Image: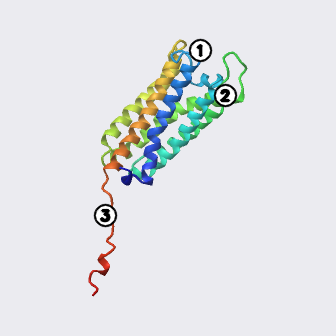
Amino acid sequence: MSKRLDINSVPALVGTVGPIVVIVGDIAASLSITGYSPVRDTVSSLALTGIGWLQTICFLAMGLLLEIFVAGLFFNLRRAGGFRAGIVLLALCGFVLMLIATFHMDAPGSPRTIDGTIHATASYGLGLLFPIAILSLSPSFKSTPNCKSIFIYTLIAGILAFGLIIGAFFVELTSWFGLYERIIILNALVWVGVVAIHFLRLLLKREPKPQSSQTGGNGGKS
């Protein structure tokens, strides 16, 4: 298997690892804090606790890995309508993730700060950027060989992401906002992981290039 993996496999590999890092980090941090409820409390509020560094590292790592993953899509997808916009917006999602990790939310009841404002704006912005990005890329998935199933799944994930972020503005979520937020994040992480695994499988199935003969050029010499 290692012989069939090359530099082109790196984006698919990091796209597979990134979501796992975030999910495991969130579970580990949530279980480490007494009184913290993943159903009630937001993911961002973990940054205000003693183990907030773990959440920060996970989101920074996911942002960086997402940029590498986007580079893989840039070189492996066939260009169709919306391709450039989708690539730019998805790359921007990675940058916004790093903003969210760097600027922490304001503690409940505390005065509004610049850090908290940037965090809140980036969080809602990411919720809108992600569905626009992947829906813009969906025609390119459709035109890429062996990506028909990913095209359909991308449409589903994009529409679901839109519905969830819009719902966050209109639905009363006081007692279970943490769970709702985690569903939004999980939908995005699963999409990245599924697409990454799909391309990794295609790369592993790819036939290795035949090696040129070293002796053929001398065969006719006496």
Q: Are marks 3 and 1 in contact (CB under 8 Å)?
A: no
Nearest to the eye among marks 1 and 2: give it: 1
The residue to which callout 1 is attached is 34
Q: Position of residue 30 (x, y in %)?
A: 55, 21
Find the residue positioned furthest to the bottom.
222
* Image vertical order of residue 11 relative to residue 30, above or below: below
Q: Amino acid at mark 3?
A: Pro
Local SS, label 3: loop
The one nearer the camera, 24 or 76, is 24
Task: Give whichever of discs 3 and 1 has the lower sequence position.
Answer: 1
Q: Can I make out residue 144 in this image?
A: no
User: Callout 1 environment at 10 Å: few (<14), some (14 to 19), or many (20+)?
Assistant: few
Q: Can I make out residue 50 in this image?
A: yes
User: Callout 3 environment at 10 Å: few (<14), some (14 to 19), or many (20+)?
Assistant: few
The residue to which callout 3 is attached is 210
Q: Position of residue 154 (x, y in %)?
A: 38, 36
* Image vertical order of residue 69 relative to residue 153, above or below: below
Q: Which mark is residue 117?
A: 2
Q: Amino acid at mark 2?
A: Thr
For residue 152, what is the image quadrant?
Answer: top left
173 left or right, relative to 187: right
Q: Are marks 1 and 2 in contact (CB under 8 Å)?
A: no
* Image vertical order of residue 60 relative to residue 82, above or below: above
217 left or right, relative to 113: left
Disc 3/disc 1 C-alpha distance (Å): 59 Å
The one nearer the camera, 173 or 191, is 191
Q: Position of residue 12 (x, y in %)?
A: 43, 45
Q: Amino acid at mark 1?
A: Thr
